[in-house]
Image: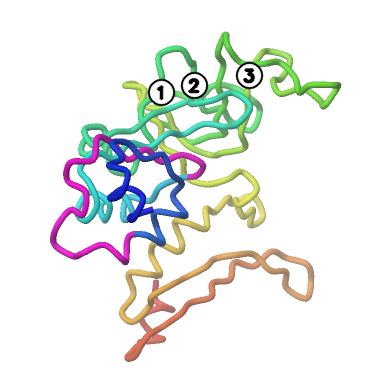
Amino acid sequence: LVRAIDKLGATHVLSSPGIVARLLPQMPAGAQRFPDLGGLRLTGGLVSPELRAGLLQRVTSRVAVDYGASEVGVLAVGDPDTFRVAPSSAGRIVPWVTAEAVDDAGQPLPAGERGLLRFRGETFPPAYLDDGGPILDAEGWFKPGDIGRVDANGLLTVDTREDDVINLGGLKVLPLEVEAVLVRCPGVTEAAAYAMQTADGRPLLVAAVVCGDPWEPAAILQR
């Protein structure tokens, strides 16, 4: 990719978070490798604030991120100005799409509250070709299966996938939030939270951590 940009004089690059995450360690530290690039647009997955910060510092200042789905297209777009205001957001809902977060009963939640995300737009196709099944529900909403929030200014925050939420006897836990706390512990470099069952069938929250040297077990347990 780097050779192609240099050789062809590319002005814009469309890529995925996975590719640029592997690209970033090869970029020089302390300077942008492509300061004159017209734009680096990422799509196909969520982009962490850490990855965005690294791209802005070492690749180009013109980074944009699309949030959407193959079935319905782009639902939100984030640019450097958006991320300066809301670094944890996925971008701003595009004007032709309506977005809501709903509770377990399917009722809309107030702006800024976390729930299951759903989207509606006049350009959304209702079903897959050749009886492949519906894309939208009976009310015309598309549900990608993400948990997140939409604030009063149209900023979208995606917290996790619906099927990643851990239900501990009615208490719903987001693994990403647990992992974010654990990686702040001294010596912890990676963390993964997940659910297991006790011998009597009760759900149990478990975390696996990768630690460097030195590390402090007591500090991790206190978290």
Amino acid type assigned to the residue bearing label 3 in the image: Trp
Q: Main secondary structure of the magenta part?
A: loop
Magenta highlight on residue 46? no
x, y percent for residue 70: 60, 31
Question: Which badge, 2 or 1, comes first in the chain's sequence?
Answer: 1
- State yes or no: discs 1 and 3 in contact (Cβ < 8 Å): no
Checking the image for residue 141, the label placed there is 3
Q: Which residues are magenta?
A: 24-45
Marks 3/2: CA–CA distance: 9 Å
Front residue of this view, candidates 21 and 207: 21
Magenta highlight on residue 39? yes
x, y percent for residue 175: 52, 58
Give the quadrant of the C terminus: bottom left
**Which residue is label 1 attached to?**
93
Q: Secondary structure at mark 3?
A: loop
From this view, report whether residue 190 is shown above or below residue 66.
below
Front residue of this view, candidates 77 and 162: 77
- Quarter-of-image position of residue 3: bottom left
**Which residue is label 2 attached to?**
99
What colouring does the structure picture have? rainbow
Residue 214 left/right relative to 203: left
The residue most toward the bottom is 214
Question: Which badge, 3 or 2, comes first in the chain's sequence?
Answer: 2
Residue at the spot 81% in from the left edge and 25% down from the top edge = 133
Amino acid type assigned to the residue bearing label 1 in the image: Ile
